[in-house]
Amino acid sequence: KQWYQRRVRAGTGPSPYLHVKIAMSHHAIGQYRRACKSFEDAYLLSSTYREHVGTYASLLAQQSNTGALEQLCTRLSETEGVECYIAHSYLAIVKEDFHTAIALSDRACHVSPRYVPALVARGCAEILSNKTTAAMITFRTVLTVQPSCFEAHKGMVIALLKVERYKEAVIAAKESVKQCPGQSRTFLLIAHATSRYPEENGKLRERAKDFFLKALSLDSTCEEAVSNIAILFIREGKAMEGLEHVKTFLEHTSSSRVHTSAGECYLALRQPEKAHQHLSIALELNRNNTRAVNALQFLEQHDYAESEFLPINLPTTWSSI
């Protein structure tokens, strides 16, 4: 990544090729926001540039950014090819037209068999359409071709969790740590897998917090880790400890998700005014933050001093994991 950045700075002018290479470097280590920015820089320089546009589409789909995906696919409408099929497949996924998404990713695979981005798109569509067995087969195929593909490891873990094969899900998550060493997102994955164990396996569930803390130690800007750490501390009746992690994060980064966690911690600590303040900020940053909306509604509709704290559930969907 640093080599490509030096090339961009030292070159006679910015190059879409180099920006895409930087984007793919960010993507390979899970820095998705930076990857998106580099893709945007590349396609602003050349709207006809097609390399890895499918990967860019997958990032927009993760963000549920339907508008940007539609614009991208409109730009690609006059061309065909593997990357274009993948981009249109992700647009269909966001619109919950999973049958079309699978058909488009299959077209990409027909042009280029065993092409990893096309297979990942198909696996995403399969798992979201509850074709869990088919999704596991697809993701296993990806991992035979590219063992370090984190998206395939994630897909396999989610598929196993959907069919309540918890032990296998944890094993699959541990394999991602082995194949993608030193990455925060792999510890997030194993944390989610361990947190799904049934209550009778409480000891393993307790380890989820350790994995979230490990993810945070590898990436201090990981808002998902901070948010889930706060949730787990709240469940243990240690909201103040969770709040300390949240405050540290908010000292250098503003995030709708983490402000929501701050609000939830203050709710658990019976400090409704501070809770309202953070939840309001969360909604200013993201009007679609349903967790913040639900918490505010709870706060406004109850005599909080005499109420139980609203229940919080860890996410189980593809996008949230």
Image (cartoon, grey):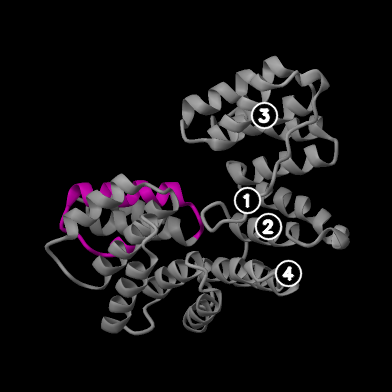
- Earlier sequence position, callout 4 versus callout 2: 4
On residue 166, the disc is 4
Q: Is residue 127 above or below residue 60?
A: below
The residue at which mark 2 appears reads as 192
Place of residue 14 in the rendered image (x, y in percent of width and height, measured from the top left)? 22, 49
On-image quarter of the N terminus: bottom left
Residue under numbered circle 1: 315
Secondary structure of the residue carrying tag 4 is helix
Q: Residues within 10 Å of mark 2 (few under 14, many from 20)?
A: many
- Cα separation, mark 2 vs mark 3, equals 21 Å
- Residue furthest top in the image: 273
Q: Nearer the viewer, mark 4 or mark 3?
A: 4
Residue 77, image x and y in percent? Answer: 16, 60
Q: Residue at x 18, y 54 (%)?
A: 74
* Alpha carbon distance from label 4 to label 1: 15 Å
Residue at numbered disc 3? 262
Q: Nearer the viewer, residue 225 or 98?
A: 98
Whether 29 is drawn above or below 131: the answer is above
Disc 3 is placed on an element classified as helix
Q: How far separated are the C-alphas under marks 3 and 1? A: 18 Å
Quarter of the view holding residue 267:
top right
Q: CA distance from mark 1 to mark 2?
A: 8 Å
Query: In the rendered structure, which segment of residues is drawn in magenta?
Result: 29-54
Q: Earlier in the sequence, mark 1 or mark 2?
A: 2
133 on left or right of 86 = right
Which badge, 4 or 3, is on the more N-terminal residue? 4
Q: Amino acid at mark 2?
A: His
Tell me: residue 257, above or below residue 107: above
